[in-house]
Image: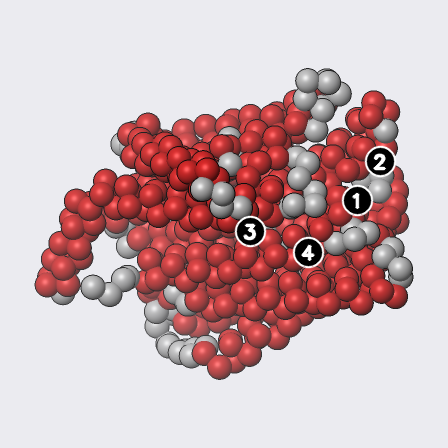
Amino acid sequence: MKLNKFLEGIFSLIISQIFIKIFGVLYSLYLTNKTGFGDGGNAIYMSGYQIYALLLTISSIGVPNAISKLISEKSSIGDYKNEDRILKIAIFIFSLIGFLGSVLIFIFSNYIAVNIIQIPEANLSLKILSPAIFFVSIISVMRGYFNGKGKIYITAKSQFYEQVIKSILTIVFVEITSKISNYNTEAMASVANLATSVATFFSLIYIYLKYKKESNIKFGNDFLQERILVILKKILFISIPITMSSLISNLGKNVDSITIVRLLKNIIGEENAKRKYGILSSKVDILIALPLSFNTALSTALVPEISKKRATNNLDGIIRKIKFSINVTFLIGIPCVFGMFFYSERIFLLLFPNAIEGYEALSFAAFSIIFALLIQTVSGILQGLGNTKVLLISSIIGLVTKIILNFLLIPMELFYEKGAIVGNIFSNVVSFIILYISLKKTIKLKINLISSSLKPIISSILMIIISNKLYYYLLLKNVSNIISIILSIIFAICVYTFVIMIFYIKDVKKYVKYKNAQRLDK
């Protein structure tokens, strides 16, 4: 049976995200284990990157979903004339915003590095990253357009090519610079960020060429041409709450970059404080972001899909998509929580053999994954339903929770940098509760979260027990530790997949029967 466009879109994005994260982990491993880079270089590299991500949020985050929502609504009713106008107006407006963001980060890079994040070495990294904000502002609009047209595979390809170029150039630039600068950490961190700017430029060229080749605009006479101000109002009405909520969510990461070093340097010394921030911002955050990136595919595909069904008053279709999406979120998130909690030391031994410090933080941070995933999914649903204001409210309350807990817990010897992780966990829990209550009020939805999570939990427990036995069995047979870790992790994935298939075989059969009945009706 041929998969529908919704599942095809999710599948293409998930596949691209898998390869993106593989490349991302590879170059992160290279940087972390590179002589002269390590945790100190990661602190410089990531502190600059987090500020860049913050300004990037203002100029681009929220835009793809806003554009995809508007484009999908116009496309579903055949209003191709205004569909094209939405795209052109959005590109003009957000390219201006992106240009302003680039200028601001370039001009104030020294002030940000010295006075805000208190890592002066990040100054050059911020200047080098500044052009990428302009490039991504345009890219985000184009990706929103293709998502709304149901061509999510183009977004997936552009993200994949961008990551490949970034990963290759990062290694090449750092390798060359290490030789020229005699392993100067600041120089290597700066050129690592240069790879980001170059990669986004090539991504912009690719997605523009795809638009010129694949866009097939039909100008009909059935619809009046909408005024520029009307279109602009629609874009801003949808994108501003999404952008602001994403901005506030990204501020949570910047809270760590500002508070960890600031609060710990007088307790454990500035160098140790920077190193602990480097561990969290590079090793832990990269691994925690893996399941989030996979779930992004689901939340991205949800916005235009639910928008279309809402435009045609297909309430049953909306409810089916919501239940399906929440179930998939649990299927992705719960095994990741179990795996990173129980296997954190083995994961660090495998990925960071020369810098194993910080695996306890990963075990701690694993609990934040499931709530972060649920926030992504429910946010995508609410965006498709047109309820975006609550995204901003939940983000603000979550950020306040994060700031308070960071300042309370980080100075405590019991926590130190782990206080930031606790703050993040509680921030995600609070935000999710607000979003979920709003979803149940927006649409009458009966779904039992405990019941939906039960099968993945049971499957994950079996996964850990069986794969753990294999790990120790291999060690008894004198198999090397690294090989034992790799084989046990692969086996864990196989066990989880097998048990889940057994649990959901009846549901799959029902879905196939339902889709066949739909085809017969047509």
Find residue 458 and name its label.
none
Residue 348 located left or right of residue 41: left
Circle nearer the N terminus (4, 1)? 4
Which residue occupies 55% across, 26% down? 426
Q: Quadrant of residue 207?
A: bottom right
Task: Give whichever of 211, 10 is nearer the camera.
Answer: 10
The local crowd at label 2, few if under 14, some if 14 to 19, many if 20 or more residues have their Cα within 10 Å, is few
Real-space Cα separation, disc 1 to disc 2, in angstroms: 8 Å
Q: Which of pointers 2 and 4 indicates the residue nearer the eye?
A: 4
Task: Give whichever of 42, 257 is nearer the camera.
Answer: 42
Residue denoted by label 1: 40
Image quarter in which the N terminus is found: bottom left
Residue denoted by label 4: 30
- Residue 130: % across, % down: 76, 59
Query: What residue type is disc 1 on?
Result: Gly
Residue denoted by label 2: 271
Find residue 62 and name its label.
3
